[in-house]
Image: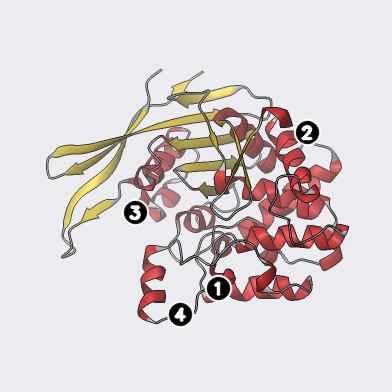
Amino acid sequence: MSNAIVNVTRGNIVESKHNVSIVVANSSGEIIASAGDENLITYMRSAAKPLQALNVILSKAYEKYNFTDEQLAIMCASHYGEEMHRKVISEILEKIECTKNDLLCGSPLSISEDYMKEQLLNHHKIDQLNSDCSGKHSGFLSVCKTKGYPIETYNQPDHPMQKEVLQVISSMCDIKPENIFIGTDGCGVPVHGMPIKNMSIGYAKLATPDKLDENYKFACNKIFDAMNAHPEMIAGTNGFCTELIKNTNGRLCGKLGAEGIYCIGIKDKDMGITFKVEDGNFRALYPAVMSTLIQLDLLRDSEIKSLDRFVKPVIYSNTKLPIGNIIADFKLNFK
């Protein structure tokens, strides 16, 4: 099966190519369309965050702490560490009677290149609240506080909370826990590896949970609705996840993961989509996502226009002259 190719042009020639594997599947595991390796095994990375956040609701932490949609949304996020994000993380920590020092996510600079430059130029103080994963970690802490689990080791695979998360991901993605590969994510917690088809199954259920039991159905609807109510929490200013959710009017949720992974769930369509740029380069990801959504007829003309800068991104010189483009060049194979 042919790969999805994303070309990088300079002037009149293609200078580089990126291979992308894509699987569009329903919650029963039936493949609707694909490109590349349908059985590719990789880590879900931060694309797993909305599924991991389900446990905040299933564990009753959501009820105990009366989390707002904004707070649930940032638990699903790879946020930019902007002031609005730091504020919400602080509110969560105050609710659960923890401090930033309880977060085991490290203190990296912003994952947004633009905001990182601002942080450096203005000598921002960088701490755990700045981590793009601090929302997920705050959610983990809330479960530990609800269930009386130790908080000092919540990042370990054998921690009872992480075992619960593994079961949630197993259930959502229709894969046995023993068949999920466990590694360590950049933020220090377990990361889950599986075929990309199974990730699509998980997102199909997340967006259209009608066939799930009532607890899972409620949790999926809360997470999906929270992400759509507060897309600014999911990434940040001009971020792709934020813009995609914001401009599609409650019809989908999408989430980025490191090394070129992206997952989307389509509301009321029983459809999940997973993308993996095989060399991990993000620049190929957004054109591949946009091309796929357009080929699946999932975007209105006005939405495509609003997201136009992600369809065929322009490459600029150091003096801000347009010198090339990043262009998706593939057709999905429909089943």
CA separation in Å, label 3 and label 2: 36 Å
Q: Quadrant of residue 288?
A: top left
CA separation in Å, label 4 and label 1: 9 Å
Q: What is the crowding at mark 2: few (fewer than 14 residues within 10 Å), some, or many (at least 20)? A: few
Q: What is the crowding at mark 3: few (fewer than 14 residues within 10 Å), some, or many (at least 20)? A: few
CA separation in Å, label 4 and label 2: 47 Å
**Tag 1's secondary structure?**
loop
Mark 4 and mark 2 lie on one chain; the one further toward the N terminus is: 4
Instruction: Please state, as top left, top right, bottom left or bottom right, where the N terminus lies in the image.
Output: top left
Q: Nearer the viewer, mark 4 or mark 2?
A: 4
The amino acid type found where label 3 is placed reads Arg
Res. 309 mark? 3
Res. 124 mark? 4
Q: Nearer the viewer, residue 3 or 295?
A: 3
Mark 1 and mark 3 lie on one chain; the one further toward the N terminus is: 1
* Residue annotated with mark 1: 127
* Residue 112 visible in image: yes
